[in-house]
Image: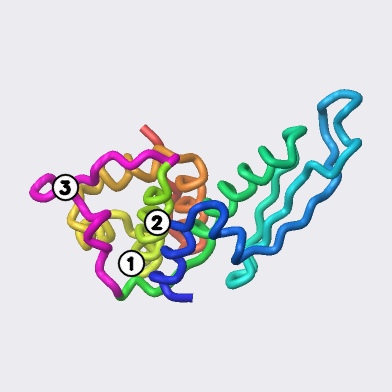
Amino acid sequence: MTAAERDLHLLLDDEALVRHCQLSFVRSGGPGGQHRNKVSSGVRVTHQPTGVMAAAGERRSQHENRKVALSRLRHALATEVRCPADEPMPPDIATIPGSKRWPHVSTAKLDYWRLAACILDRLQADGVRLSDTAARLDVSTGSLVHFLAADDLLWRTVCHMREAAGLNPLRRN
């Protein structure tokens, strides 16, 4: 899968993304009282092009679990599917001109996970050296660290990448 194809899937709305997935409904365990497991409210979503899977079952509503599972699938697509970083950063998610930092992108926006995926691709291509990646992306290293530290899943992903590359773990300030 190319970065452009992955990014396209990250930007799809829920209904369009579901068309590329296999959904299964399960009875899931856990807290919730006497009404908890009377119906199959748990949702498991498998993205067909990549095989990436996400699940949710902590809510009593299948509809809510489906929404949570699709959100987790986007997280997983961004953090698990690495693509070659030969392409430049898409211009619509590049830095604020002349500022060496990114505009604020909410984790609730689909662009957030596309930006995260592009950064992770670039980090992998640069041997998970943050200063090299920051220079290549034309942002400050502090801005890059701030972006990564804002989301626990993204931070853990980068720490695992650094560990696999034999580098020291990152520390939050």
Lateral position of residue 60 relative to residue 122, left or right: right
Image location of residue 28, percent across then percent down: 83, 42
What label does residue 114 carry, if any?
Answer: 2
Residue reaching furthest left? Answer: 98
Up/down of 164 relative to 72, above or below? below
Residue identified by numbered label 3? 96
**Secondary structure beneath label 3:** loop
User: Where is residue 41 shown, x and y percent of the image?
Assistant: 79, 41
Q: Nearer the viewer, residue 124 or 40?
A: 40
Magenta segment, prevailing SS (helix, strand or loop): loop
Would you place residue 99 above or below residue 114 in this image?
A: above
Q: Secondary structure at mark 2?
A: helix
Quarter of the figure that contains the C terminus: top left
Image point 70% across, 49% down: which residue?
55
Q: Which residues are magenta?
A: 87-108
Rounded to the nearest whole Å, what is the CA distance between mark 2 and mark 1? 18 Å
Mark 1 lies on residue: 126
